[in-house]
Image (spheres, coloured by chain):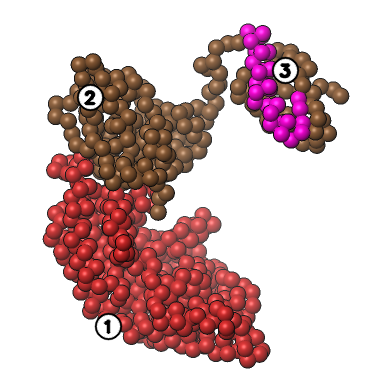
Amino acid sequence: MKTIYLDNNATTQVAQEVLDVMMPYFRDLYGNPSSMHTFGGQVGQRIRAAREQVAALLGALPEEIVFTSCGTESDNSAIRSALATRPDKKHIVISRVEHPAVRTLCSHLGMQGYKITELPVDKNGILDLENLEKSLTPDTAIVSLMWGNNETGVLFPVEAAAMMAHEKGILFHTDAVQATGKIPINMKNNVIDMLSISGHKLHAPKGIGVLYIRRGTKFSPFLIGGHQEKERRGGTENTPSIIGLGKACELAAKNMAQENTNVKKLRDKLEKELLKKIPQSRVNGDVENRLPNTTNISFEFVEGEAILLLMNELGICASSGSACTSGSLQPSHVLRAMGVPFTMAHGSIRFSLSIYNTEEEVDFVIEKMPPIIERLRGMSPFWNQKEQACTNQ
Amino acid sequence: MWEYTEKVKEHFLNPRNVGEIENPDGVAEVGSLACGDALKLTFKLDENKRIKDAKFKTFGCASAIASSSALTEIIKGMTVDEALKVSNKDIAQYLGGLPDEKMHCSVMGKQALEKAVENYRGAPALEAGAKIICECFGVTDKEIERAIRENNLSTVEDVTNYTKAGGGCGGCQDAIQQIIDRVKAEPKTDNKPKLTNIQKIRLIEETIEREIRPSLKQDGGDIEIIDIIGNRVIVAMRGACSTCKASEITLKDFVQHRLQELVSPDITVEEAAK
């Protein structure tokens, strides 16, 4: 059975070009970039080149790029550094729809005595900057807001938000794990202090991330050890992955236009046709202001896990914000923050595309989804009845 | 990804008895859209008062659909009284087991069955004296107590996995803990008949012979009963046990624990003076 992979916000395939540049660094060129000999030193040179490739995608300086192990490490490092370098400040501002890498960290910090403000979003997942303005206090150490939402793709006005924080002397961090490579980012045109990237979301391997730290920003390292990454992140470099990520960033820059034309066109076709063919379905999140590859669609009166497993039978991969997929009993915190009715949230499916998806694949999904939903609705006691029982929202 | 058994997958992909029986003898709806799963169960009896047909409609995940399908298969051919004896464990077992986090799906089946029987008998829907503990998912204290007893649950998380209670806002978690504490504090001998002294001595001997000695012998040890005075069991450790530094622990954590469990909670075990 052919796999149709529409779950690229979860992870992506490593690009062939990326794998090719990585391969020599596992066996043949295994030297330690910190070594004095040429055998290791040549790897150090290659890492410098990768750092330049990453910087180029972001409009950053190479020295502003710190390689980490993943997006979560980057997020943790940024927020913990802000608190460590501003020890007198005890307040953090985030949003209610942040990734667990930020949200769970902040709830732990909350237990350690920090005050956490979680900004609300409206029914389309949009952040109101006025609320941000009101939340900032002299005690605020850092504002951390995601650039593109992983579940809905909705974009936050992080550049404007960073200005707002800066006016009050507050640090600004953004989790750009989903946005990087999908929308143009130019750090020369904004005042964002720190930005997190994850390699495996843009066709590099898992286990590699980046924390961008603007030049001049005080930084306190999370991993303390050797002098690697200019003492901002100890630990021997993950050389193959760093080199792979450099290539992936170069490809992302090259494919950016395609991402915003072809991928977007396929996403829009998928969305439009599913909404047309399946009654009682709707898109979650603002449709204008979002990542070009993501759509989050709710099918009322059916449950997401059941939908996913029937899709799985046909080799179609996607995600759901339903409670049952996560093992928790509440549907996705993002959809709840948007006030999506529970009847819709339980039946939400996220499709996230990449440049490797084809029109044939999208057509196949458009053909197969309506009978899947119909089959489950045929089993649902609520279908045709449309009764909403509990109202504990 | 959940690790579902082949049987769960099979019942999810090919559910038996989907639908609604017209003019059913018993009907029930449990759960709700907001909760993420819901089940409507209908059944019809034959002239011998056995369940001739049962059908379901379920909104929910794969395990909810499979549990509903299993339930209808299990109860067909049973009398109403027999059906009432089907527990959530039976449903889960029929499916070759369910992940812990999904046990509530089998409990939902059990609840639907009880309500449908109540509906058939015209009995009240809410158990007498039951009180809603979890507002989010509408779970009563009686339901929580029963899940704790039948499945030997010991943590709030277990209770949430089995009944959903506490999985929403979390506001009732303290109340659930109190119910767990209360159920656990109940003497376990409630439904065991009172033993005469002779019966008790015999049961102690049998338990040691069957449950305790084989384990000790595996490690080269042995045990001998010296005397039984009321609830005091005086024993001598033999073989490897007699020189083992951990024999005191074996005595209290294993021998005494098993005897308390299987004979009487009042039993204490002592080692005879050497």
Name which residue type carries label 2: Lys
What residue do we see at 70% from left, 12% from top? B230
Residue B40 image point, x, y percent:
23, 35
Circle 3 marks a residue in which chain?
Answer: B
Between residue A13 and residue A320, name the one nearer to us: A13
Figure check: A202 above or below B27: below
Q: Is residue A251 above or below residue A208?
A: below
Chain ID at mark 1: A
Few, some or many C-alpha atoms within 10 Å of disc 2 (few <14, some 14-19, many ≥20)?
A: some
Query: Residue beneath label 1, please?
Result: A257
Q: Are marks 2 and 1 in contact (CB under 8 Å)?
A: no
Q: Nearer the viewer, residue B130 or A94?
A: B130
Q: Residue at x 31, y 52 (%)?
A: A309
Question: Residue A269 got which mark?
Answer: none
**Residue at mark 2:** B52
Which residue occupies the extreme right position in the image?
Answer: B274
Secondary structure under badge 3? strand
Picture coordinates of residue A337 (x, y %)? 31, 56
Q: In which quarter of the image is residue B263?
A: top right
Q: Give the range drawn in magenta.
A: B196-223
**Chain (red):** A
Residue at 29% x, 49% y is: A306
Side (left or right) of A278 relative to A245: left
Which of the chains is brown?
B
User: Does mark 2 fall on the same chain as mark 3?
Assistant: yes
Give the amino acid at mark 1: Ala
In this rendering, the label closer to the viewer, 3 or 2: 2
Marker disc for residue B232: 3
Label 1: few (<14), some (14–19) or many (≥20) C-alpha neighbours in 10 Å:
some
Dominant SS type (magenta): helix
